[in-house]
């Protein structure tokens, strides 16, 4: 039932795409589509413009609400301390920022750092009705060139966002740069379910049900076809751990959630 392009890339293909996304001249990928490298960021902005209004609702619908549990587990794993200063890279509608703000108390602060204004605004509306409003700030910018000085944050996190960054390695290097020595980096990202029959069901759900619901509710089949494609190109947990170690992070560990649909990586500068 599934076509070849609706399953997972093999090791070599994934490695090639990671290498190519680092090469400044070669085209890169937007989902499975090859795009000129200098156009990818604009495509990503366009993509999130089209989904921003429905983003939170679609997330909850498509994951049956489980993304809230994943995000809670991820922030808990960071073991944040009162008064910590935290950067939420690709922070979007601020779900992780809200959870982190509750952990660090009124003396701490979280910056939602995102390239897309519509996503930030959706987050601002949500935060406006909460008791942690004053602890959350917003900066619009590219994760490849984070506009903060070196060694500024106690922790940096990225949830379901690094996949979209054209040069993913540069994004992690920037997170490393702005962390204080000893600071924690957390990455929550989709991955490959480990149990083959479950993976088969997940693939069918991803390539048939998700685009259908995307079209029906958010008015965009394309946006919700890009999502499963980009997930299948993302490095597997060991590959990502290896990349983080090569960047300079230590104590790199990860935890699979829901049979590996999502994975939390934790690392120390
Ligand atoms: C799937 S959303 C995740 C939002 C939020 N972190 C969450 O967990 O719900 C990905 C976010 O990454 C942002 N993004 C994509 N590329 C980016 C880049 N190069 N720099 C900063 N933000 C980026 C998008 O605008 C979008 O808001």
Image: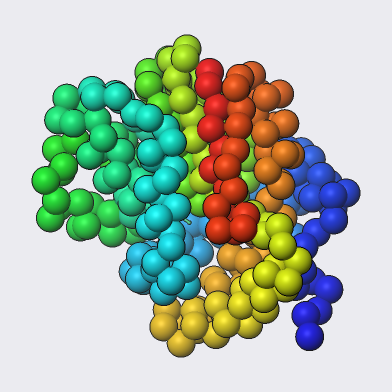
For the point 61% across and 77% down, the residue is: 205
Residue 247 as seen in the image, left or right of residue 11 = left
For the point 18% across and 31% down, the residue is: 105
- The image shows residue 24 at horizontal and vertical percentages of 73, 38
* Res. 253 image quadrant: top right
For the point 22% across and 39% down, the residue is: 102
Residue 235 as seen in the image, left or right of residue 150 = right
- The image shows residue 149 at horizontal and vertical percentages of 41, 18
* Colouring scheme applied when the structure was drawn: rainbow
Residue furthest right in the image: 12
* Res. 136 image quadrant: top left
Report how many numbered discs are placed on residues in the image: 0
* Res. 200 image quadrant: bottom right
Closest to the observer, 203 or 119: 203
For the point 70% across and 68% down, the residue is: 199
Closest to the observer, 172 or 254: 254
Q: Is residue 174 visible?
A: no
Above or below: residue 182 compared with residue 11? above
Q: Is residue 7 visible?
A: yes
- The image shows residue 21 at horizontal and vertical percentages of 72, 44
Q: Quadrant of the N terminus?
A: bottom right
Above or below: residue 244 compared with residue 219? above
- The image shows residue 241 at horizontal and vertical percentages of 67, 34
Above or below: residue 114 compared with residue 245? below
């Amino acid at each position: 039932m599934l076509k070849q392009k609706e399953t997972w890339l093999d090791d070599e293909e994934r490695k090639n795409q990671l290498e190519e996304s680092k090469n400044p001249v070669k085209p890169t990928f937007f989902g499975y589509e090859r795009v000129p490298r200098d156009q990818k960021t604009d495509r990503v902005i366009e993509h999130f413009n089209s989904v921003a209004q429905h983003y939170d609702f679609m997330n909850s619908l498509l994951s049956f609400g489980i993304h809230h549990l994943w995000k809670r587990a991820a922030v808990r794993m960071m073991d944040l301390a009162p008064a910590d200063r935290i950067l939420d890279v690709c922070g979007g509608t601020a779900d992780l920022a809200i959870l982190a703000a509750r952990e660090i108390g009124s003396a701490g602060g979280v910056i939602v750092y995102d390239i897309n204004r519509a996503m930030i605004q959706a987050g601002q509306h949500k935060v406006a009705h909460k008791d942690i409003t004053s602890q959350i700030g917003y900066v619009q910018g590219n994760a490849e060139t984070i506009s903060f000085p070196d060694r500024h944050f106690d922790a940096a996190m990225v949830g379901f966002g690094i996949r979209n960054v054209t040069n993913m390695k540069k994004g992690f290097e920037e997170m490393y740069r702005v962390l204080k020595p000893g600071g924690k980096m957390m990455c929550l990202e989709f991955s490959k379910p480990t149990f083959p029959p479950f993976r088969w069901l997940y693939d069918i759900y991803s390539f048939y049900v998700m685009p259908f619901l995307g079209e029906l509710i958010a008015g965009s089949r394309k946006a919700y076809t890009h999502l499963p494609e980009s997930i299948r190109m993302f490095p597997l947990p060991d590959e990502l751990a290896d990349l983080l170690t090569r960047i300079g992070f230590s104590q790199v560990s990860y935890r699979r959630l829901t049979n590996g649909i999502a994975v939390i990586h934790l690392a120390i500068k």
